[in-house]
Amino acid sequence: MTAQKRRKQVKRRGHRANTQGPEPLAGVVRDTARLWRKHHLDYDQTKYVVAQARHRLSLQPPRTRRRTVERLEKAAAQRQRAYQWALANMSGL
């Protein structure tokens, strides 16, 4: 069995990234890797370079991110906790 066939059979678990897929960014990744390799950058240096590039481009993270699970509002969460504590007290837990 070839490596490509084995790779296709593997099912990945977990969440998919909410970024662009590998096709549109493949060229950017390739060029970035070439530059970093050319300048012999280590992990900490690449982290610094990315931070500086974001700063120069005035890139900011999104104010709110999409959550996988909608959270309860504070008041609703407090009511839920109070209800659960009351149930626990009635059942002797």
Image (cartoon, rainbow, N blue to C red):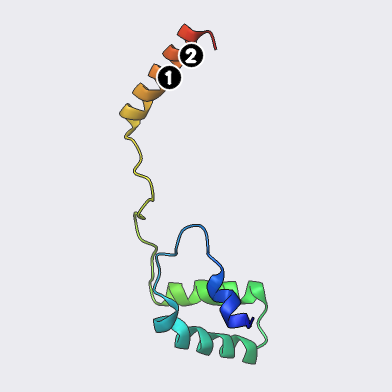
Disc 1, SS: helix
Q: Neighbour class for label 2 at 10 Å: few (<14), some, many (≥20)?
A: few
Please tell me in which quadrant of the rendered image residue 78 appears: top left
| Residue drawn where x is 65% and y is 72% of the image | 44
**In the image, is residue 36 above or below residue 51?**
below
Please tell me in which quadrant of the rendered image residue 37 appears: bottom right
Task: Specify the quadrant that holds the C terminus.
Answer: top right
Q: Position of residue 23 (x, y in %)?
A: 42, 82
Disc 2, SS: helix
| Mark 2 vs 1: CB contact within 8 A | yes
| Residue drawn where x is 50% and y is 57% of the image | 14
Q: Position of residue 65 (x, y in %)?
A: 36, 55
In this orientation, which residue lies closer to the viewer: 7 or 63? 7
Q: Give the residue type at disc 1.
A: Gln
Q: Neighbour class for label 1 at 10 Å: few (<14), some, many (≥20)?
A: few
Q: Give the residue type at disc 2.
A: Ala
In this orientation, which residue lies closer to the viewer: 55 or 79? 79
**In the image, is residue 8 above or below residue 30?**
above
Q: Is 61 on the left or on the right of 35, as rendered?
A: left
Task: Identify residue for label 1.
Answer: 84
Q: Is 61 on the left or on the right of 7, as rendered?
A: left
Q: Position of residue 12 (x, y in %)?
A: 53, 64
| Residue drawn where x is 37% and y is 51% of the image | 67
| Residue drawn where x is 44% and y is 63% of the image | 16
Task: Specify the quadrant that holds the N terminus.
Answer: bottom right
Label for residue 88?
A: 2
